[in-house]
């Protein structure tokens, strides 16, 4: 029994020492991130953009469109029928029209949903970048997921984006550094400590470094990422009138800027409306934000180091 007690003691000591080493490593990485300071960041109006739609005419199959009835202008998985119909994100004419509309609306660029190297979304990126360049728009990626839930794969995916697209003239940059937005799911999959390692390592490997905006409004996230944002605010705006949304924004947006702090980038999310209740994997009741004929767009953005 004595050898068993010794073994347990050794394991306990080992765990304690390993936790100490990890804490020391995290402290060193945080110290490196503490050197980051962003001030006078130019304000940008960016729209989340989903280049994940396909139709049989262009891609040979329906992608993300389900139960399409073009004659009745209905799509089973979509509450609204697009003005361009069930389009394909790889269709140059569609991407050009989207960029034209964005430019006319005063949008500076797109944050494009991105999942894996060389997948359907990734293959759409060159067309989006080249078309955006023609219209003077800027493009960033929305890093959606880390399938293996390992920081090493997250870094591999980040380096794919940076090495393949980071130097494109249309890629969104701050002080010459390419910007990547990271979705909350991807943050949750490897944790903030995992992203701390990824960000430091990516900045070491990519010449000139990069900028990372994380989908989490917290002080700790702001210490790790270059900036913070939140993706979907419909849970907070559902059922509200434009006036109520405006009052909510005036109260909450300054808090978000404060959480980011004076040396980090704060992004404030405006939602034109949201209704995903027709998607098969969304269980009722769903939080739905009415469109209010565009009135929500008049909510003031506030001030601060915002993009």
Image: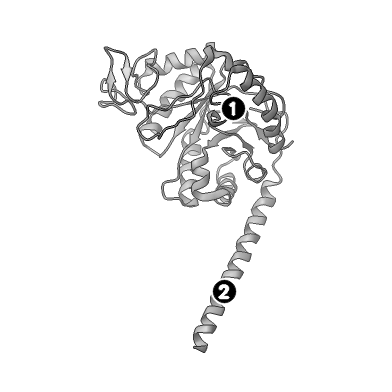
Q: Which of these two is toward me, 289 or 28?
A: 289
Is 285 on the left or on the right of 268, as rendered?
left
Q: Which of these two is toward me, 103 or 149?
A: 149
Q: Position of residue 293 (x, y in %)?
A: 52, 12
Is 84 on the left or on the right of 272, as rendered?
left
> What crowding class fits label 1: few (fewer than 14 Cα within 10 Å), some (14-19), or many (20 or more)?
some
Q: Are marks 2 and 1 in contact (CB under 8 Å)?
A: no
Q: Which residue is mark 1?
A: 269
* Outermost residue toward the right in this view: 262
* Residue at position x 32%, y 13% in the image: 73
Count of labels shown?
Answer: 2
Of the numbered discs 2 and 1, the one sitting upstream in the chain is: 2
Q: Which residue is mark 2?
A: 12
Q: Quadrant of the C terminus?
A: top right
- The part of the image, by quadrant, that contains residue 108 is top right
Gap between marks 2 and 1 measured at Cα: 46 Å
Q: Which of these two is toward me, 63 or 129?
A: 63
* Residue at position x 48%, y 13% in the image: 100
Q: Secondary structure at mark 1?
A: loop
């Amino acid at each position: 029994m004595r050898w068993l007690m010794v073994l347990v003691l050794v394991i306990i000591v080992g765990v304690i020492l390993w936790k100490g080493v990890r804490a020391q490593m995290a402290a060193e990485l945080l110290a490196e991130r503490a050197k980051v300071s962003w001030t006078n960041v130019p304000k940008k109006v960016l729209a989340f953009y989903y280049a994940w739609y396909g139709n049989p005419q262009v891609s040979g199959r329906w992608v993300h469109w389900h139960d399409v009835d073009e004659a009745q202008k209905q799509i089973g998985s979509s509450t609204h029928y697009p003005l361009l119909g069930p389009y394909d994100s790889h269709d140059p004419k569609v991407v050009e029209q989207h960029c034209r509309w964005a430019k006319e609306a005063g949008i500076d660029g797109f944050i494009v949903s991105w999942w894996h190297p060389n997948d359907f979304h990734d293959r759409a990126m060159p067309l989006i970048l080249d078309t955006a360049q023609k219209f003077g728009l800027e493009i960033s990626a929305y890093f959606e997921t880390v399938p293996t839930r390992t920081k090493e794969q997250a870094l591999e995916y980040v380096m794919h984006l940076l090495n393949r697209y980071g130097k494109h003239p249309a890629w969104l940059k701050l002080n010459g550094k390419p910007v990547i937005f990271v979705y909350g799911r991807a943050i949750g999959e490897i944790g903030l400590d995992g992203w701390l390692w990824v960000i430091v390592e990516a900045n070491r490997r990519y010449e000139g470094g990069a900028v990372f905006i994380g989908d989490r409004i917290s002080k700790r996230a702001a210490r790790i990422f270059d900036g913070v944002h939140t993706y979907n605010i419909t849970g907070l705006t559902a059922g509200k009138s434009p006036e109520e949304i405006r009052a909510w924004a005036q109260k909450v947006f300054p808090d978000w800027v404060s959480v980011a702090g004076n040396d980090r980038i704060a992004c404030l999310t405006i939602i034109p409306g949201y209704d995903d209740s027709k998607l098969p994997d969304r269980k009722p009741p769903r939080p739905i934000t009415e469109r209010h004929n565009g009135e929500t767009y008049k909510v003031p953005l506030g001030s601060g180091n915002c993009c």
